Amino acid sequence: MKIESTKTPQTQINNHSSRKQCSKIVQALERAGSAGMSTIELREEIDILHPAGRVQELRESGYRIDTVWTVTTNAQGHNHRCARYVLHGKRGRATCD
């Protein structure tokens, strides 16, 4: 049996650095306003695989982000209890580093 290579050409790989993901989250939360975005929405809509980790990094860098527990339906139609993040600005010179 021949096994096909799973390597993807570098030109087809998106930038998924922590910094880029944090930047995408900040932009998405700013657009969402007081409605915020759930973990599921951040995963499915803006391609963040570990939203909680990135949100923690943003908090540590000065962003004020609240967590509201909610029930959200995923793309498969299943309900999940998950975090909804709401951005309330930043303290001092918050960065995405």
Image (cartoon, rainbow, N blue to C red):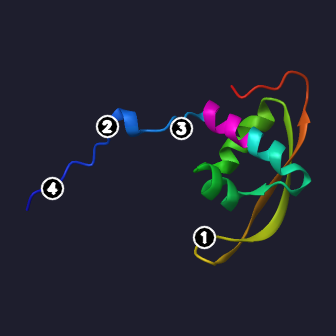
Mark nearer the viewer, 2 or 4: 2
Do the numbered discs 3 and 2 sit on residues whose CB atoms are within 8 Å?
no
Say which element carries label 3: loop
Q: Earlier in the sequence, mark 2 or mark 4?
A: 4
The earlier-in-sequence mark between 1 and 4 is 4
The residue identified by callout 2 is 9
Q: Which residue is mark 3?
A: 16
Magenta highlight range: 19-25
**What type is the residue that disc 1 sits on?**
Ala
Of badges 3 and 2, nearer the viewer stands 2
The residue closer to the viewer here, 55 or 38, is 38
Mark 1 or 2 closer to N-term? 2
Q: Which residue is mark 4?
A: 3
Could you tell me the amino acid type at mark 3? His
On the image, the x and y values in percent for residue 45 come to 64, 55
Crowding at label 4, few (<14), some or many (≥20) Cα neighbours within 10 Å? few
Cα gap from disc 2 to disc 4, whole angstroms = 18 Å
Q: Residue at x 57, y 51 (%)?
A: 49
Structural distance between the alpha carbons of marks 1 and 4: 31 Å
Disc 4 marks which amino acid? Answer: Ile
**Residue 61: x percent and y percent?**
78, 29
Disc 2 element: loop
* Secondary structure mostly seen in the magenta stretch: helix
From the viewer's perspective, is residue 94 above or below residue 54?
Answer: above
Give the alpha-carbon distance from disc 3 to disc 2, as whole Å: 15 Å
